[in-house]
Amino acid sequence: MPVESSHITGTSFPVCIAHRGASGEEPENTLRAFGRALDMGATWLELDVHLAHDRLLVIHDPTLDRTTSGQGPLAARPLAEIRALDAGRGEQIPFLEEVLALAAGRARLNIELKEYEALGPTLASLQRAVAAGKWSPDQLLLSAFDWDLLDRARQREPAFPVAPLVGKGAGAEVLEAGYRIGAEAVHISRWSARARFVDAAHARGLAVRVYPVNRRWEFELMVRLGIDGVFTDYPDRALAWGARAPAVGAGSA
């Protein structure tokens, strides 16, 4: 069934961010999902990282049950066993380095840190990617629900932009945190998206990006609120509705 385009005119449209890749149609946080999102035309990918056995694994949960053929805590299984699991349609849980290689020059990455232990290895991995000339720092954004973690990230490597995450009830505290740590944006639940909040964020120089936005009425509401970016499981739909996919090149965001 074809996706209808948006009928809103005369306004600015948000950037399309593929939430865990094209996760509405492919197994989330897999190379297949990220590749599908890129093929759809998305130029921004969101993913999650956990540290296990000194490797950065792209997976949302600290357990294997929901998204793989395995069970139990991620850290309780040997790395070889983790990589042998089916993450959906025969896909593996990817390493962060594999996603960096896939998306280099094609998309910006939003990397959500799930625990403090992942911070140092993530910064080191991103620094290596930049040093190799595959990425520029402004194409690699870190986000987390732990705002102190992002503050530490900024102190250790100020070149990488950050964005604090918050769920329902986003208010002045996340704006104050974002401003204090020099964030690029705040990332909020769609249930927290209000015109007053968006105006207050923009007054502080903070972009507002909203998750998840999968239905047309939600997208059009975000447009009317002046939201700067939408995280979506269906990037093809969001792009058809008018979401933007900025060109990605050396040194560009």
Image (spheres, helix red, strand yellow):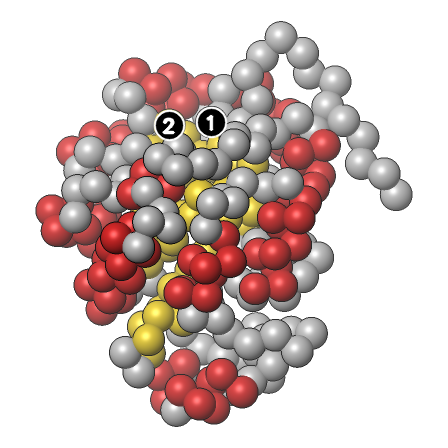
What residue is pinned by disc 1? Answer: 228
Q: Is residue 42 above or below residue 35?
A: above
In the shown orientation, is residue 83 left or right of residue 39?
A: left
The residue located at (25%, 44%) in the rendering is: 160
Callout 1 environment at 10 Å: few (<14), some (14 to 19), or many (20+)? many
Residue 22 can be seen in this image? no
Instruction: Tell me what residue is drawn at x 25 percent, y 35 percent.
Output: 183
The reply to whether callout 2 and callout 1 are in contact (CB within 8 Å) is yes
* SS at mark 2 in the image: strand
> Tag 2: residue type?
Ala
Mark 2, Cα crowd under 10 Å, few <14 / some 14-19 / many 20+, is many
Marks 2 and 1, the one that precedes in the sequence: 2
The kind of residue tagged 1 is Asp
- The answer to whether one can see residue 249 in this image is yes
Q: Which mark is residue 119?
A: none
Q: Is residue 187 left or right of residue 123?
A: right
Q: CA distance from mark 2 to mark 1?
A: 6 Å
Give whichever of 166, 44 is nearer the camera: 44
**Residue with the most extreme front position:** 133
Residue 85 spot, x, y in % from top left: 56, 85
Q: Position of residue 25 (x, y in %)?
A: 70, 57
At a point 46% along the width and 66% down the height, the residue shown is: 98
75 or 240: nearer the viewer: 240
Residue indicated by mark 2: 207
Rendered view: 230 above or below 203: below
| Quarter that holds the C terminus | top left
Which residue reaches farthest top?
10
